Image: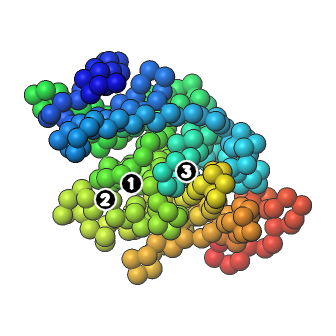
């Protein structure tokens, strides 16, 4: 195909998305009718040729049980996450590129009680929430006059005005992280995903991204807000065989020591298997309110849960 033919093809592909590609907007990120994600960059941002990438989003699982069947998650961890979502804990899914963050987030959302009203905010639509009361929103590029842009920060703020029971943000990359933390800190349960190489690094990134919102935002505000707003980090990665696996589930106690958010390993990987660690999640009273015995949920199959140490 010639350069002109490729440009015509891209233009046809973009028609249904409502997004444009020209010299004033040399990048485009759009959703195609089949659910694929299209990303295009044109010269002179690229050296010579138009760069076109199509990401096929194949949702291999729709629930935590299906992730268990695929080997991504153990039954024990799945039952805990299911209980944590039902109890309204705030969950962050972390991982690298192509680690299965969107699929895992979608499966966690499937555990949300069907009576809840869920509002989701994404750069482009990727989540497919299997719930009866869902409002899904995506960002919008500016028009030819440079107006009309709807960034992710605006969506998060508007979502709070839509009477949500729970808010879902597809992924936080920039200063919209501040608006999400403020929403979670107000008592509204929520979930989102973030790029990170470990659960600990995800916590550090959550403490750093809000600083992009302006000079008046500092660590003295952000760090304790992360500690009190985020309850669980679920980290997923791809192993040496290309298999996507949950590697660790970490709880945030709500305490800060010397600008470091205190964490506790609830599940960790040992000998290439996700197993129960010694930590506990915050807010055990939320599990009790649902009639769930947290100690029993966390107890490994066939074992008796040891006495919880003082302070838990």
- In the shown orientation, is residue 44 left or right of residue 80? left
Compare marks 1 and 3 and give the one earlier in the sequence. 3
- Where is residue 60? Give x, y as percent: 64, 36
Mark 2 residue element: helix
- Give the residue displayed 46% in from the left and 60% down from the top: 196
Q: Are marks 1 and 3 in contact (CB under 8 Å)?
A: no
- Give the residue displayed 52% in from the left and 26% down from the top: 133
Find the distance from the CA under tag 3 to the CA under tag 2.
Answer: 24 Å
Which tag is nearer the camera, tag 3 or tag 2? 3
Which tag is nearer the camera, tag 1 or tag 3? 3
Q: Nearer the viewer, residue 86 or 24?
A: 24
Look at mark 3 in the image and give the residue it sits on. 99
Look at mark 1 in the image and give the residue it sits on. 181
Task: Tell me if I can see residue 107 in this picture.
Answer: yes
Which tag is nearer the camera, tag 1 or tag 2? 2
Q: Are marks 1 and 2 in contact (CB under 8 Å)?
A: yes
> Residue 210, which numbered label?
2
Residue at the outermost left position: 145
Residue at the outermost right position: 302
């Amino acid at each position: 195909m010639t350069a002109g033919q490729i440009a015509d093809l891209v233009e046809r592909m973009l028609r249904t998305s409502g997004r444009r590609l020209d010299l004033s907007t040399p990048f485009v990120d759009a959703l195609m009718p089949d659910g694929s994600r299209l990303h295009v960059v044109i010269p002179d941002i690229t050296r010579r040729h138009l760069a076109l990438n199509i990401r096929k989003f194949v949702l291999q699982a729709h629930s935590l049980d299906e992730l268990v069947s695929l080997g991504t998650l153990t039954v024990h961890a799945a039952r805990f996450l299911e209980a944590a979502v039902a109890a309204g804990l705030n969950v962050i899914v972390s991982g690298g590129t192509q680690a299965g963050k969107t699929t895992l987030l979608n499966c966690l959302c499937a555990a949300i009680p069907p009576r809840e009203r869920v509002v989701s905010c994404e750069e482009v639509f990727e989540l497919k929430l299997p719930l009866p009361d869902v409002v899904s929103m995506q960002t919008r590029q500016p028009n030819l006059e440079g107006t009309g842009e709807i960034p992710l920060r605006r969506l998060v703020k508007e979502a709070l005005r839509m009477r949500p029971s729970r808010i879902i943000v597809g992924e936080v990359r920039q200063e919209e992280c501040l608006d999400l933390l403020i929403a979670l800190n107000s008592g509204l349960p929520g979930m989102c995903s973030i790029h990170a190489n470990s659960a600990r690094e995800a916590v550090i990134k959550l403490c750093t991204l809000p600083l992009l919102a302006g000079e008046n935002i500092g660590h003295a505000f952000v760090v304790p807000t992360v500690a009190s707003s985020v309850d669980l980090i679920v980290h997923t990665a791809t192993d040496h065989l290309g298999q996507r696996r949950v590697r660790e589930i970490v709880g945030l106690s709500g305490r800060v020591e010397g600008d470091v958010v205190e964490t506790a390993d609830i599940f960790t990987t040992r000998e290439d298997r996700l197993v129960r660690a010694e930590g506990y999640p915050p807010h055990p009273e939320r599990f009790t309110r649902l009639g769930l015995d947290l100690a029993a949920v966390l107890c490994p199959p066939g074992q008796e849960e040891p006495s919880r140490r003082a302070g838990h």
